[in-house]
Image (cartoon, rainbow, N blue to C red):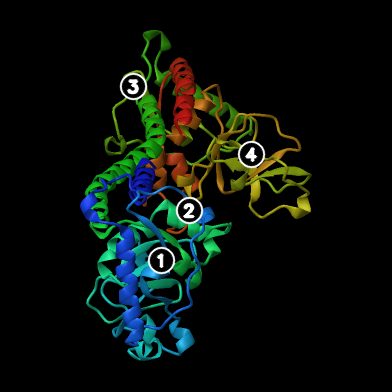
Amino acid sequence: MIAERLRKSILQAAIQGKLTEQLPEDGDAKDLLVKIQAEKAQLIKNGKIKKEKALSEITEEEIPFEIPENWCWVRLGEVCKMVTKGSSPKWQGVNYCSSGVLFVTSENVGCEKLLLDAEKYVDLKFNELQSRSILEVGDVLTNIVGASIGRATIFNLEENANINQAVALIRLIMVDMGRYIVKYLNSPLAYSIMMGNKVDTARANISLTDISNFIVPLPPFAEQQRIVEKIEELLPQLEKLEKDEIKLDVVRKSFPKKMKDSLLQSAIQGKLTEQLESDGDARDLVAQIQKEKARLIKEKKIKKEKDLPEITEDEIPFDIPKNWCWVRLGTITYNHGQKCPDQEFTYIDISSINNEKNTLGSLDNVLQPNAAPSRARKIVHKGDVIYATVRPYLHNICVIDRNIEPEPIVSTGFAVVCTPMPILNKYLFRYLLSPAFDSYANDNENSRGVAYPAINDAKFAKALIPLPPLAEQHRIVERLEKLLPLCDALE
């Protein structure tokens, strides 16, 4: 994201001396280093800190970029009282408890902030066993293990606290340099040094020796303060930009889906197409369908189904054009029934549907009758629409758009929608994808189950559908097939 790239650029510019003006009165960072080393020598002499192995000289090959003349390159360990890390309570035989020593882990160390939403505490005994890593105000903390490696902040709490083995404690000679050092540790330079040649960032780890050997571009103290102030002046603007980017990203990701839903909903409300007198009335179409269903029942090609209840005013969710009509889905459709497979068949289950494209996926699940799953029962033909009634919000819906050999059998987890005459299966398909039907299918009164909500065949048949005349169905489908791919292109 732009905000994150800008943040990195600002930090990188800051540690290269490009964010602030160099002033003669600031003096030279080499003098600051001499002062720090003198204080460190005194602390060693007084037994306050241990003398550590001398760090190697910085070579020309290590220096990644030029810095202002009054800056100097130092190793981080040169300006520290100590660099250490904590331990695991388990290793020390100490238990977690509700109060005691605040226990800081890598989860708590964010970029320039302590993340203490879920505080952990260990028994006071831990500080006795792990006294070296007891935290003091002003300590710099940085993560040295795992995916959050390199995140750094200052510990600023007046609280009894310690750390685990995934966090390095950097205690500076000059505590007031902490804010600059944290900015450095969060910079792209420090991260690149930390990661080096490591490939698996999730399992990466940095040793304390590595930390001590980090090279730091050190400005005079006055300029360190100006750098910190400048960065902190800019950060709120970056945070606002980041929030705006997150909002924009949410809108960008949700817009294609919302646009599709809006088009589908407009289509089934008659708002996407013009109503023409020449189309006739959808009620005449319903009468033709019922006549055709009666013929099929008489010829025993389909079974007579239980009568569906009359539609009440309370059920109607929105207005539709005058030449449209509301019908129950079961009134204008039927199904082919069920059978136990008695020969080789192509089994279509829920996973056979690509629910992103709403198309049939792989049809290579060819089975023998003796291997038929108990749910392999529903007969389906080319042109039928199948709708997954289990977890309907997943939209496993498609049109059987081809002849399938060997004969297809679908799972009882589908509702099979067939039409007795040329009502457009593609119109029904789009209707089943619409927010109106989605709301019906996922309504608690119409679905059962919580973890795996489902709508049964009876509830499916009772669903209301706004039915246009056949000619307008054609226009609606044609319009949607032009517009919906444009929404897909936005994703």
Disc nearer the start of the sequence (3/4): 3
Tell which tag, 2 or 4, sits nearer the viewer. Answer: 2
Q: Earlier in the sequence, mark 3 or mark 2?
A: 2
Mark 4 falls on what kind of element?
loop
Tell me the mark number nearer the camera, choosing from 1 and 3. Answer: 1
Query: What amino acid is at disc 1?
Result: Leu
What mark, if any, has residue 87 been given in the picture? none
Amino acid type, callout 4? Gly
Among the two numbered marks 1 and 3 on one chain, the one whose residue lies closer to the N terminus:
1
In this figure, which residue is indicated by the disc labeled 1? 76
- Of the pair 268 and 108, the residue shown nearer to us: 108
**C-alpha gap between disc 2 and disc 1:** 14 Å
Above or below, 472 against 81 in this view is above
Q: Which x, y percent locates residue 72?
A: 37, 57
Instruction: Give the Cα separation between the discs numbered 3 and 2.
Output: 67 Å
Examine the rendering and report whether any part of residue 244 can be seen: yes
Frontmost residue, 232 versus 64: 64
Q: Which-is-in-front pick, marks 2 and 1?
A: 2
C-alpha distance separating marks 1 and 3 = 68 Å
Secondary-structure class at tag 1? helix
Counting from the top left corner in percent of width and height, residue 121 is at: 33, 81
User: Pointer 2: what residue?
Assistant: 63
Q: Are marks 3 and 4 in contact (CB under 8 Å)?
A: no
Q: Sequence-wise, which precedes: disc 2 or disc 1?
A: 2
In the rendered view, does 353 fall on the left or right side of 251? right
Local crowd size for mark 4, using a 10 Å CA cut-off: few (<14), some (14–19), many (≥20): some
For residue 299, what is the image quadrant? top right
Label 1 to label 4: alpha-carbon separation = 58 Å
The residue labelled by disc 4 is 361
Residue shown at the point (32%, 87%) measured from the top left: 46
